[in-house]
Amino acid sequence: MQQSVIYQEWKEEFLQQGEQTGALREAQLLILRLLDRRIGDVPSEARSQIQTLSLEQLEALGEALLDFSKSADLANWLQDNQVG
């Protein structure tokens, strides 16, 4: 069974999805650490919203947070980007 073409395709797809999920989780953690450092403690509601972002959205937030100075900036970004 492990040598079948279908099994090999499934295994490769599963590994790729795992890598993508891992990369997404690492990006979320990095963004949250950067936000903590930039604006202080991130409210739990905002943390929850950030955990729903796609990798593309996380990249955009990563760029935007360079201009943040307070938690309201994050809240406005999340609202403007229709998150949550």
Image: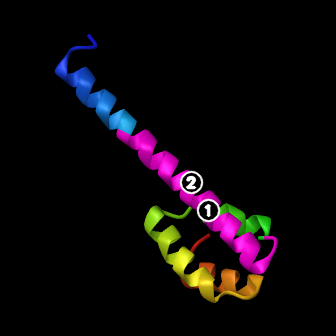
Residue lying furthest left? 5
Give coordinates of residue 50: x percent, y percent: 62, 65
Whether residue 29 is in magenta: the answer is yes
Answer yes or no: do the residues labelled 2 and 1 have beta carbons within 8 Å?
yes
Q: Label 1: how many residues lie within 10 Å, few (<14), some (14-19) or many (20+)?
A: some
Q: Position of residue 38 (x, y in %)?
A: 72, 79
Side (left or right) of 21 relative to 75 = left
Residue drawn at x 37%, y 34% as measured from the top left: 14
Mark number displayed over residue 26:
2
* Lateral position of residue 42 relative to residue 63, left or right: right
Query: Which residue is denoted by mark 1 in the rendering?
Result: 30
Between 74 and 68, the residue placed more toward the observer is 68
- The coloring applied to the image is rainbow
What residue is rendered at 26% in x and 10% in y?
1
- Looking at the rendered structure, which numbered label has been put on residue 55? none
Give above or below for 26 relative to 4.
Answer: below
Quarter of the picture containing the C terminus is bottom right
Q: Is residue 25 left or right of residue 16?
A: right
Mark 2 neighbour class, 10 Å CA radius: few under 14, some 14 to 19, many 20 or more: few
Say which element carries label 2. helix
Q: Of residues 78 and 55, which is closer to you in this image?
A: 55
Q: Amino acid at mark 1?
A: Leu
The span shown in magenta is: 16-41
User: Which secondary structure type mostly characterizes the magenta part of the structure?
Assistant: helix
Q: Amino acid at mark 2?
A: Glu
